[in-house]
Amino acid sequence: MGNIVAIVGRPNVGKSTIFNRLIGGRQAIVDDESGVTRDRQYGTCEWNGKIFNVVDTGGFVEHSDDIFEAAIRSQVKIAIEEASVIVFMVDVTVGITDLDEDVTNILRRTKKPVMLVVNKVDNHERYLLANEFYSLGFEQIFFVSSLTGSGTGELLDAVTEHVSEDAHIETDLPKFAIVGQPNVGKSSLVNALLGEDRNIVTDIAGTTRDTIHSKYSKFGKEFILLDTAGIRKKAKVHEDLEFYSVMRAINAIEESDVCILMIDAQTGIEAQDMSIFRLAQKRNKGIVLLVNKWDLVNKETNTARDFEAEMKRKIAPFSDVPILFVSVHEKQRIFKAVEEALQVYENRARKIKTSYLNDQMQPEIERYSPPMHRGRTVSIKFMNQLPTPYPAFVFYCSNPKHVKDSYKQFLENRMREKFQFTGSPITIFFREK
């Protein structure tokens, strides 16, 4: 089913603390404009050699008491549909509440693995109190303290047993995911690309229900479109559209080669867009940015050049990404978007011959060698590309631990200039020669 782990439960039971532990460190999105720090709602966790995505449902509930209980229930239902493992958190200091029992009743109906996590168990007395949660009837129960981290290792061991490395669609064609916030125009883009001429659309058997994978073949171009908008929208999820679309986007990003991230020209790049961007970057996917609804923007106060400069500032240091200004509604430049995505797909798959790589990069390294670190020199002897589906390189050198991030960035920039990796993240490793 994929590899999303969803954390559900009442507010204030410590969901975001455990979430931050799982994805390693406090990762928060800082919104430049208003000085608001909005907690990250999803991220990646690596444990026992498996990589999976963690979603914290806590970031999605609007706080108004009467609706929030309903919102929590509906999120639990969405989590059951979209996630592969559910972590249900409760708080030992409060005991079992009515809402905990409601959530338990919903979770009882699923065949998916549910981990009951009793949080704030950080002394002997609380350990004894925590035993009352066995009465909820879950087989897998963990006593943890998200603040100190005790018990999280056992929880992660159990979670990874149930996470599958995804069964991807078997195809040699490029796979493009159209992602972005609700109402940015994803479905309209899909419809505009596929056209009314629906006979070019073949739904591929065996794909996840609802995410419609369509094969596109027009103008001599062929690719698979992963539509995250879920054209067959379910009526019941409208109030949780944001949460629902995030779950969708994560699954589609995993499956894709290139993510076409749509941004609303009227709002610019927002926190939610940034987290989708970083997720795609972290998973080494190609990225194309489409600024949609450009026809509605006042060009006198907002030029494309200024807008693009601002976007590049926000996505830095990985700013070598195509940015296109489109209007799906007016069908402006949407086929240009397809061409860019195909080019990024090609860039991401590019292999550089070892001899050529060394011929091009050695003069750069001689011109600007790695700075010394605590009196230790780093000398880079040789480099080659790894056989991964995305660009990854190993630089063999002395004292690899002492190479600074700024130097790594310098090497990446030089490689981008020489080998055309626009739109694709590059991974660089330093190894002892």
Image (cartoon, rainbow, N blue to C red):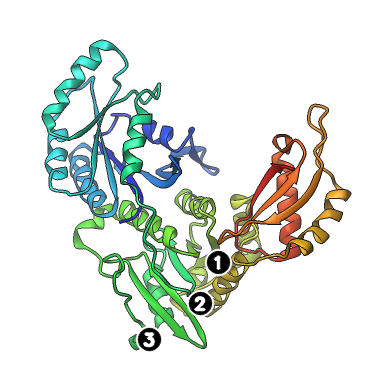
Residue at the image position 13 percent from the left and 32 percent from the top? 136
**Which residue corresponds to mark 2?**
334
Q: Nearer the viewer, mark 3 or mark 1?
A: 3
**Which residue corresponds to mark 3?**
200
Mark yes or no: residue 25 visible: yes
Q: Label 2's element?
A: helix
**For residue 50, what is the image quadrant?**
top left
Q: CA distance from mark 2 to mark 1?
A: 20 Å
- What is the total number of numbered labels drawn onto the structure image? 3
Picture coordinates of residue 346 (x, y %)? Answer: 60, 71
**Which residue corresponds to mark 1?**
298
**For residue 196, what is the image quadrant?**
bottom left
Q: CA distance from mark 3 to mark 2?
A: 17 Å
Residue at the image position 59 percent from the left and 66 percent from the top? 349
Quarter of the figure with the C terminus = top right
Q: Nearer the viewer, mark 3 or mark 2?
A: 3
Quarter of the figure with the N terminus = bottom left
